Image (tube, grey):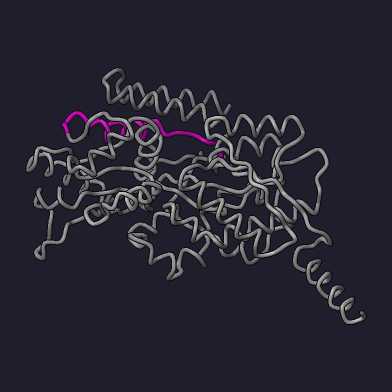
């Protein structure tokens, strides 16, 4: 009897030392994933729940379209989940509202030092970590090998040539059009074009997102250059105005040489069995870019503030969040890039199809850090579409964008 009691006491001491609490804790976890992503996340949660019996994670998947409205309503109503997914691009608004708990005193030093520097800094405000990034999902450039071969874009061994700079990419697109009559590149007409590609080109042209005082701003001259860079692909017939599904279909069917899309598309290409002819590479910077950049948002893990914070639940939520980040190899099967070096540099991750070809994009990824980003984002989409449809000039679009930014951040 004494032996059994001693074992129980030792086990209890171990639980306290590892988890910081003395009895099992259940935490609610709100997610916005569906399809393949939802399946992977559910499996990871089930795995965590089976591996130990001191924390039980209860997942509540919500519809993507209503997710942030419901999350904000739960915060305002004083009954938020214990843990939630939040895009990095949304963090600023919630941090400034004071609705997210800073995590520094709960997060282990091991994971802090394991993160890619650009990723953890993007989740840090006033020296405090407010979220644990789970991934980054940047814009990348997919290509159809058959189209490149048909256009003569091959080396002496018959291997396809890939553009090293954005200028070279433009010339490749011209050659595809001239030699085959097909589109050089395609991109969907909404977020892909107006936000993700626009911001990527803007940064690689030398455009900054902060002034000397650290305030968000857009350089009007470089914004105008960005619109012109995009517009020439449409004016010269190197691309066409299409939605997301059509852009992807044009690439797969061999009607376009390149397609700008997010890393998440690779999972779909794997399922379709087309990776023999479809390749992927980082978005090339300009030859004069001092540092390569690419738009890349992140799914992060946050702890919403509640009227009465339960310390055991906070510790349990952080314990699970760290476990999830450290097991992000499984999550990477959905196409997302891991953001901790221990996973990103692992042989297991690099053995996934094509991951080595674009993993450097994680180090180049950025998202704007500004309050009211949704309003600026909507304006970016509206103006870029207006430019390529001939409704507004690049100069006027740049002026209107700067005006909107000044109104939002003042």
Q: Is residue 232 left or right of residue 129?
A: left
Percent coordinates x, y for residue 358 in the rendering: 35, 57
In the rendered image, the quadrant that contains the C terminus is: top right
**Residue at (80, 54) in percent of width and height:** 312
Farthest residue toward the front? 1
Q: Which residues are magenta?
A: 214-237
Percent coordinates x, y for residue 57 in the rendering: 68, 52
Placement of 125 over or under 183, stated as above or below: below
Percent coordinates x, y for residue 24 in the rendering: 79, 58
In terms of depth relative to the viewer, which is nearer, 82 or 404?
82
In terms of depth relative to the viewer, which is nearer, 57 or 205?
57
Q: Quadrant of residue 179?
A: top left
Percent coordinates x, y for residue 323 in the rendering: 62, 61
Characterize the magenta stretch by its predominant secondary structure: helix
Number of marks present in the image shown? 0
In the rendered image, the quadrant that contains the N terminus is: bottom right
In terms of depth relative to the viewer, which is nearer, 108 or 267?
267
**Residue at (8, 40) in percent of width and height:** 178
**Residue at (55, 55) in percent of width and height:** 43
Farthest residue toward the left? 179
Question: Residue 410 magenta-drawn?
Answer: no
**Residue at (42, 34) in percent of width and height:** 219
Q: Is residue 329 left or right of residue 231?
A: right
Question: Residue 224 magenta-drawn?
Answer: yes
């Amino acid at each position: 009897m004494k032996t059994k009691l001693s074992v129980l006491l030792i086990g209890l001491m171990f639980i306290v030392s590892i988890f910081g609490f003395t009895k099992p804790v259940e935490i609610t976890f709100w997610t916005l994933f569906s399809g393949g992503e939802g399946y992977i996340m559910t499996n990871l949660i089930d795995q965590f729940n089976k591996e130990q019996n001191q924390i039980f994670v209860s997942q509540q998947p919500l519809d993507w379209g209503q997710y942030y409205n419901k999350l904000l309503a739960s915060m305002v109503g004083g009954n938020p989940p214990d843990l939630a997914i939040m895009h990095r691009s949304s963090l600023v608004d919630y941090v400034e509202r004071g609705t997210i708990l800073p995590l520094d005193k709960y997060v282990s030093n091991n994971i802090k030092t394991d993160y890619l520097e650009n990723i953890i800094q993007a989740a840090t405000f006033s020296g405090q970590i407010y979220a644990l990034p789970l991934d980054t999902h940047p814009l990348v450039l997919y290509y159809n090998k058959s189209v490149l071969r048909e256009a003569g874009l091959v080396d002496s061994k018959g291997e396809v040539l890939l553009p090293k700079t954005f200028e070279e990419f433009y010339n490749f697109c011209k050659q595809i059009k001239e030699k085959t009559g097909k589109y050089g590149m395609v991109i969907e007409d909404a977020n892909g074009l107006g936000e993700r590609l626009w911001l990527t080109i803007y940064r690689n042209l030398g455009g900054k997102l902060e002034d000397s005082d650290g305030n968000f701003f857009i350089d009007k001259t470089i914004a105008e250059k960005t619109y012109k860079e995009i517009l020439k692909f449409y004016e010269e017939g190197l691309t066409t105005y299409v939605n997301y599904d059509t852009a992807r279909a044009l690439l797969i069917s061999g009607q376009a040489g390149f397609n700008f899309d997010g890393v998440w598309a690779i999972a779909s290409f794997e399922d379709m069995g087309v990776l023999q002819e479809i390749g992927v590479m980082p978005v090339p910077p300009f030859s004069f870019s001092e540092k390569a950049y690419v738009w890349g948002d992140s799914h992060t893990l946050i702890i919403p503030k509640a009227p009465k914070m339960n310390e055991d639940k906070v510790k349990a939520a952080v314990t699970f969040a760290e476990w999830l980040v450290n097991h992000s190899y499984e999550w990477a099967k959905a196409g997302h890039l891991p953001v901790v070096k221990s996973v990103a540099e692992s042989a297991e991750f690099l053995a996934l199809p094509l991951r080595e070809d674009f993993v450097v994009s994680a180090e180049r990824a950025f998202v704007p850090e500004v309050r009211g980003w949704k309003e600026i984002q909507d304006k970016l989409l509206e103006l870029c579409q207006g430019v390529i449809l001939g409704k507004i000039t690049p100069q006027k679009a740049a002026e209107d964008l700067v005006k909107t930014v000044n109104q939002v951040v003042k």
